[in-house]
Image: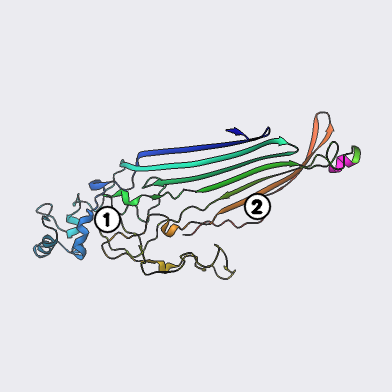
Amino acid sequence: DRAISSSMTLQVTYAGSGSHHSAVNGGVGIFSDQIEPKYLQLGSLLQQTATAATLAQAQAISPGIALPYPTFVGSIGQALRPFPQYSSINDSYAQFASASYQALQIQMQRRMSKGLYFLAAYTGSKSINNTGGTIQFIYSNPRSAYDLHKEKSIALENIPHQISLVWVYSLPFGKGKQFANQGGIVDALVGGWQISAVQQYNAGSPLGTFNGACDVPYTGGCYADFNTTFTGPVRINGSYGHGVSKTSTTTPFIDKAAFQDAAPFTFGTTPRTMAFGLRNPWYLAESATLGKDFKLVEKMTLRLQADAFNLFNRTQFGGIT
């Protein structure tokens, strides 16, 4: 904390936290019952019935493959599951995920002086995680339960910039004030009025996973690939909501040509969140109040007040899905 003047203070704070051993959707490693990623090199053989001929083809690619037990009947991919007798399992107690949060918090406050009070606060933060209760995977599980590190990404709830302004101003009119310094009817009409406002501005949350056609059997799924031949802006058609007419709600704001389906038997190259740094629109909101107290009798006051919410009629978009 530092006093800038007799009525103003500045506070700068660092906040940080980390967590480990939080929940993982679907389990980790063999307890997910997913096949190990190395077996994706078998390609379409994974979906073929395990016979002497197909096993021989699979063994030529990945030596050591064998039936899990003599009476097994099913595909080669099913045979490679850690628990091939089941179509799926779920480890409700898997707790191997981690998360971190770091923030710079700045607050400036001016105590009521010369009719003005204000509080300004800014938070710049970054939150990263790889799974957990607030993570929304396209599929129920991570792409590969054997490599949670590849799911590490900016958290969906991360808001990198948050600005809040609160201020109160006593208008300089009426008895004892700079203007119309009179009592009686003049003071009753123009004196004692206060205007106050709350302003909030938050950067948009990250866009989630981009998915596409997927061919990765016996795993948690895949994300889209970056289109390496794509050039130009990914964000198109101006600000979110711009150009949307009353008869059309299909204006695209992201160029889908920037993405492509992942190659068969690969997990996709885009991250779990925030591909190309894409975020939802900012949240912008302002509210204001104009009010005055009228003294009726010694223990009774009448308050006249007008409130305006969403003062500038800003549209609050729910985000891109």
Q: Which residue has dot 2 on it?
A: 310
Res 219 label: 1
Secondary structure character of the magenta stretch overall:
helix
Q: Residue drawn 58% across and 39% down?
A: 107
Q: Residue furthest right?
A: 184
**Amino acid found under the numbered disc labelled 1:** Thr
154 to 223, vertically: above or below: above
Q: Is residue 187 left or right of residue 41?
A: right
- Residue 23: percent from left, percent from top: 35, 42
For image coordinates 40% across by 39% down, the residue present is 18
The spot of residue 290 in percent (x, y) is 75, 45
Q: Neighbour class for label 2 at 10 Å: few (<14), some, many (≥20)?
A: some
User: What quarter of the picture does the N terminus occupy?
Assistant: top right
Residue lying at 68% horizontally and 53% vertically, measured from the top left: 311
Any part of residue 141 in sight? no
- Sooner in the amino-acid sequence: mark 2 or mark 1: 1
Residue 177 vs residue 62, the one in the foreground: 177
Q: Is residue 187 magenta?
A: yes
Q: Is residue 156 above or below residue 249?
A: above
Q: Which residues are magenta?
A: 186-190
